[in-house]
């Protein structure tokens, strides 16, 4: 009987798409790579709030926010806005926002979040911020 209850629970989680989504639930991730770039003056970050379908974070200069669309391994962002501070180096921010528009799917590989474009190339890699 216990096995049936566990199996039913697991199947309900998979059918709702919650197993993969729980990995991103309300967590902050540091961006360690954007399109092959590994060195940032200020490290960008993204916070995922699955319950509210929102993202927030810092693009390397400005804070940003937006709508999160996630379904199984598909992910995209809409209505992204940001503060408008002028920073000495805007290259990381420009790279970040361009990359954000290209993202269409994700997976976790060895505790690193990989965000992919439609053609399957890696757009960003992120590591979870340890609390």
Image (spheres, grey):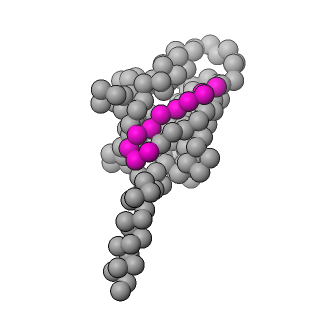
Question: Compared to 43, does 93 lie above or below?
Answer: above
Q: Residue at x 38, y 37 (%)?
A: 105
Q: Residue at x 55, y 20 (%)?
A: 93
Exactly how many numbered labels are in the figure? 0
Q: Position of residue 92 (x, y in %)?
A: 51, 20
Q: Position of residue 29 (x, y in %)?
A: 51, 41
Q: Is residue 120 visible?
A: yes
Quarter assignment of residue 71: top left
- Viewer-closest of 85 and 9: 9
Majority secondary structure in the magenta region: strand
- Viewer-closest of 46 and 73: 73
Magenta highlight on residue 80: yes
Q: Residue at x 67, y 14 (%)?
A: 86
Q: Position of residue 42 (x, y in %)?
A: 56, 27
Q: Which residues are magenta?
A: 71-81
Q: Residue at x 61, y 33 (%)?
A: 66
Question: Compared to 45, does 98 lie above or below?
Answer: above
Q: Position of residue 12 (x, y in %)?
A: 42, 65
In the image, farthest residue toward the left: 120
Question: Compared to 103, does 129 lie above or below?
Answer: below
Q: Is residue 124 visible?
A: no
- Residue 88 as seen in the image, left or right of residue 114: right
Quarter assignment of residue 99: top left
The N terminus is located in which quarter?
bottom left
- Residue 72 as seen in the image, left or right of residue 80: left
């Amino acid at each position: 009987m216990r096995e049936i209850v566990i199996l039913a629970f697991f199947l309900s989680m998979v059918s709702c798409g919650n197993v993969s989504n729980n990995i991103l639930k309300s967590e902050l991730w540091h961006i360690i790579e954007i399109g092959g770039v590994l060195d940032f003056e200020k490290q960008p970050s993204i916070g995922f709030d699955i319950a509210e379908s929102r993202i927030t974070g810092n693009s390397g200069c400005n804070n940003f926010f937006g709508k999160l669309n996630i379904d199984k391994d598909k992910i995209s962002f809409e209505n992204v806005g940001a503060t408008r501070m002028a920073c000495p180096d805007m290259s990381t921010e420009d790279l970040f926002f361009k990359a954000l528009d290209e993202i269409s799917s994700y997976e976790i590989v060895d505790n690193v979040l990989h965000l992919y474009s439609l053609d399957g190339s890696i757009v960003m890699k992120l590591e979870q911020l340890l609390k």
